[in-house]
Image: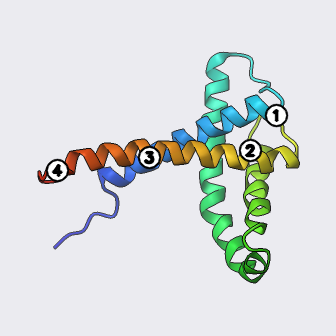
Amino acid sequence: MTTKLINRESISSFLVRWVSCSVGLWISVSLFGNKTNADTWLQSVLTYLGAGLIFSAVNAVLRTALVSLSMPFILLTLGLLMLLINGFLVWLTIVIAPHIEMSFGYAIISSFVISLVNYIVSLIIGFKSFSKTSNGGDKK
């Protein structure tokens, strides 16, 4: 019996999350940050795709550790510390990513924009998969 570690659904889910994080970063930098210092349109797209990949990696690695270590303070502040943690992760991504600049305060606000974009994408993807199985057919 062989098991697949990576299947098509997990790869497509990762790609959708990556693109939605990139779009969220693009929207938030367009609204709150300095424009990219990229020379061409292609370089700008690659910059945001790279920033989305960096954000996904930073979110996967650091968010878990930060939330675990600060759980008592998150409970004490009724979750408000999560705003600072999410803002810090966005700011760290922007510091690491080339050609993008934003202040820490705007990074906190940008975490709302990125969350909203990811939520909307999740709703769209969720409704598509729900409509395929809601008619009683098999999920294929």
Hey, what amino acid is under mark 3?
Leu
In the rendering, at what x and y percent does residue 128 appear?
A: 31, 42
Q: What amino acid type is highlighted by mark number 1?
A: Gly
Q: At x 65% / y 34%, what residue is drawn?
A: 48
Q: Check disc 2: other Cα within 10 Å, few if <14, some if 14-19, many if 20+.
A: many
According to the image, label 4 marks what residue?
140
Camera-nearest label, 3 or 2: 3
Quarter of the image where the N terminus is located: bottom left
Secondary element under disc 3, as helix, strand or loop, is helix
Q: Which residue is mark 2?
A: 110
Q: Secondary structure at mark 2?
A: helix
Please tell me which residue lies in front, 41 or 22.
Answer: 22
Q: In which image quadrant can residue 65 be found?
A: bottom right
Choose between 37 and 104: the one closer to the eye: 104
- Residue 61 in sight here: yes
The x and y percentages for residue 102 are 84, 39
The answer to whether residue 31 is above or below residue 85 is: above
Residue at image location 28% in from the left, 50% down from the top: 130
CA–CA distance between discs 2 and 1? Answer: 9 Å
Q: Residues within 10 Å of mark 1 (few under 14, many from 20)?
A: some
For marks 4 and 3, the one nearer the N-term is 3
What's under tag 2, amino acid-wise? Ser
Find residue 61 and report its horizontal and vertical position in percent. Answer: 63, 65
Q: Residue at x 71, y 49 (%)?
A: 111
Local SS, label 4: loop
Foreground residue among 112 and 1: 112
Residue type at tag 4: Lys
Mark number for residue 33? Answer: 1
Give the farthest residue toward the bottom: 72
Q: Which mark is residue 117?
A: none
**Nearer the camera: disc 1 or disc 3:** 3
Q: CA distance from mark 4 to mark 3?
A: 20 Å
